[in-house]
Image (cartoon, coloured by chain):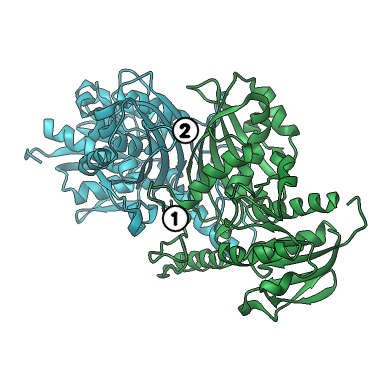
Chain colours: A green, B cyan
Amino acid sequence: MSTQKLFHIAVVGSSGAVGRQILRLLEERNFPVGDLKLLASKRSAGTKVPFKGREITVEEAGPGSFEGVDIAFFSAGGDVSRELVPHAVESGAVCIDNTNAFRMDPEVPLIVPEVNLDRLNEHKGIIANPNCSTIQMVAALKPLYDRFGISRIIVSTYQAVSGAGSRAVDELVRQSRRFLDGEEDKPELLPVASLPVKHRIAFNAIPQIDKFHDNGFTNEEMKMIQETKKILGEEGLDVTATCVRIPVLYGHSESVYVELKEEYDLEEVKSLLASAPGIVLQDNPAEQQYPLASNAAGRLETYVGRVRRDLSNPKALNLWIVSDNLLKGAAWNAVQIGEYIAIEQ
Amino acid sequence: MSTQKLFHIAVVGSSGAVGRQILRLLEERNFPVGDLKLLASKRSAGTKVPFKGREITVEEAGPGSFEGVDIAFFSAGGDVSRELVPHAVESGAVCIDNTNAFRMDPEVPLIVPEVNLDRLNEHKGIIANPNCSTIQMVAALKPLYDRFGISRIIVSTYQAVSGAGSRAVDELVRQSRRFLDGEEDKPELLPVASLPVKHRIAFNAIPQIDKFHDNGFTNEEMKMIQETKKILGEEGLDVTATCVRIPVLYGHSESVYVELKEEYDLEEVKSLLASAPGIVLQDNPAEQQYPLASNAAGRLETYVGRVRRDLSNPKALNLWIVSDNLLKGAAWNAVQIGEYIAIEQ
């Protein structure tokens, strides 16, 4: 960091899968943390969490929790954000919200630093972190968007269970064991905790993430469609998404068909990807090198491979994009935003 | 069957994953089997296999194995088919070949009975069974093709390991156990047995099925592209495929974007699918009903759901298509062809 100023940080949802990664990244990145307030639901209050050798007690989050806070990270679900973010803003905190609560609010910038950092300063106290599956896709497509323009995106996702929280990770592990032992296991959580019907995720593929809209798309699919348009700043962009949960713990994969507005040179595309910030080009079919969730898990970067010209449309391109959904897809994107805010203050 | 004639059947590759399913289906469907010759590699010769209460000894397959055989099912790999199918044809057998050996041969009909049974009689002794991922897709798209025409297909697959044979099933099971126990397991087989680099399939997604072509597509992807055009009889059809192996044992899933040539009514599309032969429409978002590999495994039908109008192209449609890759994707399609041959003789 270019400043010695220390920031009073709050992390709401600090005991969740994303909250824990935010804390780890603040520590590892040596974020200029002064006071640190860990906030969570009543259930988790009282837990002690280590941070840089200290032990910090988790407190119950409430409207009065944000006095003196400079930057507040929210990842405790949309309802908590809708309730508490306005209080945090009123207290003077800049809120980096990892939930769906404010993403499509025209007053709230939706930021992926590699893509639209220029919109960051438009914030009025709230900056939204996009959906995990959106972030890695727009990060990878940005260099192609800038150079050629994009007219159409058709994406099918292969999403890890950790996107549904740490209880979903436990469910996949438990179900897999039971399945391998030939035992029955009643699914309890997936695909959507709040809906009545549950499906087995172990050794299966579930084409439902989040609830359905009347148009037959799921909320996860609509997020990818709407957020991609907002982040790239192009309402007329055609985006189609099919979002699927597969039995992977960490790391979302995406099969992306993209139509560029201009003819392109394939080597130029690869070199644009190879030099783009936050992107690693992993594309060597002869050596069987391409992105894999197993390699991307735990890494901050977004990996791109299987880069090939479409056989039926010479302006179209096919890509395979993989990133850790809890890191670039959530915690790391949020902490990155926090770093830029810290630099500017 | 409409005839009392019994057929002298040979099954080449009778100890493999598909061969075993062919035998099970011949038994269950009460196929008019007279003599039954089970053929395999030298390694499997001598094994005894039960069939309708008898015990049949597997023999080593050779050029002289086909005397008196009426119908020969081949599923022992492309090399075996290339070597032995011509001998079987010379002996007078009709060969139903489940390998890649003759699929793109213009002299050989490539048959999915629900789609192009009218081409069956063009055979000169060889009928090719398409690739598993192709069969279920064209079976589901056929009623839409007939009614509206199709201009473009973009498919991303979620393919089960059994498509790579029973050793790949063993590998996924073994790797999954080790992974859950926190132990290392060196991948031995996947993604491609004959290539040097192996990747873990347990809790992962591998965007490689079969070898790469120079154009960056895999052989599996090229099969889907070329076979779809041949089966639908439309060389100009635009098809794009991305084929991905996921940790599922049985049942391929496919996310399919399809552009029709005409405007369509969504309810008519659903009713066409619901009444199509071999297709089960499973599409009720309100009840969280859609096709799942876990439900399709062991079934002969192809399941279609997530049927929805594309938001950016009103002539386009998105579908989720699932079928058991060893059954409709291989053994059942082959036995179906056999049944039609039997009826006609």
Q: What amino acid is at disc 1? A: Asn
Q: What amino acid is at disc 2? A: Ala
Image disc number at residue A272? none
Of the pair B292 and A260, the residue shown nearer to us: A260
Chain for disc number 1:
A
Of the pair B62 and A277, the residue shown nearer to us: A277
Q: Quadrant of residue A179?
A: bottom left
Residue B45, image x, y percentages? 37, 45
Which residue occupies 68% across, 25% down? A147
Q: Residues at badges 1 and 2 in contact (C-beta under 8 Å)?
A: no
Which residue is denoted by mark 1 in the rendering? Answer: A204
- Looking at this view, name the residue that lies furthest to the front: A90
Q: Mark 2: which secondary structure? A: strand
Of the pair B176 and A90, the residue shown nearer to us: A90
Mark 2, other Cα within 10 Å: few <14 / some 14–19 / many ≥20: many
Mark 1, other Cα within 10 Å: few <14 / some 14–19 / many ≥20: many
Which residue occupies 66% across, 32% down? A284
Which residue is denoted by mark 2 in the rendering? Answer: B241
Chain for disc number 2:
B
Q: Are marks 1 and 2 on the same chain?
A: no
| Vertical position of residue A205 compared to residue A289: above or below | below
Which residue occupies 63% across, 35% down? A141
Residue A117, image x, y percentages? 73, 42
The residues tagged by marks 1 and 2 sit, at their Cα atoms, a distance apart of: 21 Å
| Vertical position of residue A263 compared to residue B207: above or below | above
- Looking at this view, name the residue that lies furthest to the bottom: A46
Q: Quadrant of residue A306?
A: top right
The answer to whether any part of residue A308 appears in the image is: yes
Residue A47, image x, y percentages? 70, 79
Q: Quadrant of residue A88?
A: bottom right
Residue B72, image x, y percentages? 26, 34
